[in-house]
Image (spheres, rainbow, N blue to C red):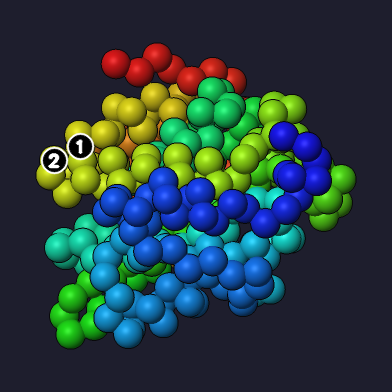
Amino acid sequence: MTVAALRAPLDIQALRAARAAAAIGHAIEHFETLGSTSDRARELAEAGAPEGVVVIAEKQTQGRGRLGRRWESPPNRNLYVSILLRPAIDAEEAPLLALVAGLATAEAVAEWAPQAQIKWPNDVLIDGRKTAGILTELYTEAEQLAVIAGIGVNLNLGLDELPPELRDKATSVYAATGRAVDRAVFAATLLSKLEERYRQFRTSGFAAMRQHWNARSCLNGHRVTISGAGVTQRGKVIGMGDDGTLQLLSEEGTEMRVVAGDVTVLDGYGSSVAKQE
Ligand code: BTN
């Protein structure tokens, strides 16, 4: 693939053809510029669009991340995608979908960078640097739950294109592996992995994929602090529970379960992906 082709808009016809008969991606809106793909997906949800509708933008002017952060969204390099899901689950179970989407995204990135890992709750890292992030937002309309899964993946971005303050924390698939990514092929892979894991979640629950999630977790066995809601917890990560909580062992030997928060790793990341069954 030439550099010029890499920097062109993604091949939306090829992507639509690849997903035409699928449950996720049967209809794909594609924009050159949007404020946020998740805002557009919400408009579609409010207008009654069916599950599996997807919005992609080449560039976002108001890309948003978790915890009120901004998501850098320069044009034609990366993937900014939001997916409308309408799961028949209780709102309390919806946070598990963020973990499901994180696993699917890590598995898609791993097709180009096999060492891809997940940092709880759902960042995807290559060699300890963030490559993808996921923001799931919930809406209830007429007692029906709508979930917008917004996924941003740095694909062909050069390291020199990242803001200086992110250069030691973030990367792209291309910067980390030297492999240029056909973004339409990546998007088709991501939507297909998400469809697979989402189906598994609906039929068998998160427990069915917990081992796969744990095998990709960069935190297991590491000492961390987790801050959120004015509380900081410190301990060694044991792994992910069937209920989607992160299990920690405190220095005093007490087991703790953490529902949400921002993780700081105190002793560096693991560098290898554990063998999956
Ligand atoms: C994070 O903070 O890690 C989550 C980042 C999520 C970014 C994606 S890009 C597509 C979608 N649209 C947005 O405005 N945000 C999400």
Q: Quadrant of the N terminus?
A: top right
Q: Is residue 95 left or right of residue 62?
A: left
The residue drawn where x is 67% and y is 56% is: 9
Dot 2 and dot 1 residues touching (CB under 8 Å) = yes
Q: Secondary structure at mark 2?
A: helix
The residue drawn where x is 24% and y is 83% is: 141
To which residue does mark 2 refer?
Answer: 204
Please state which of residues 276 and 251 is positioned toward the viewer in this rendering. 276
Question: Where residue 83 sits: x, y (%)?
Answer: 40, 61
Q: Is residue 276 above or below residue 18?
A: above
Q: Amino acid at mark 1?
A: Ala
Q: Residues within 10 Å of mark 1 (few under 14, many from 20)?
A: some
Question: Where residue 217 sits: x, y (%)?
Answer: 45, 31
Of circles 2 and 1, the one toward us is 2
The residue drawn where x is 43% and y is 17% is: 274
Q: Is residue 42 above or below residue 251?
A: below
Please state which of residues 253 and 175 is positioned toward the viewer in this rendering. 175
Q: Is residue 96 left or right of residue 181?
A: left
Q: Is residue 15 above or below residue 211?
A: below
Q: Amino acid at mark 2?
A: Ser
Q: Is residue 101 visible?
A: no
Q: Is residue 100 left or right of residue 140?
A: right
Residue 155: which disc?
none
Q: CA distance from mark 2 to mark 1?
A: 7 Å
Q: Secondary structure at mark 1?
A: helix
To which residue does mark 1 refer?
Answer: 207
Q: Is residue 56 visible?
A: yes
Question: Where residue 185 sits: x, y (%)?
Answer: 53, 41
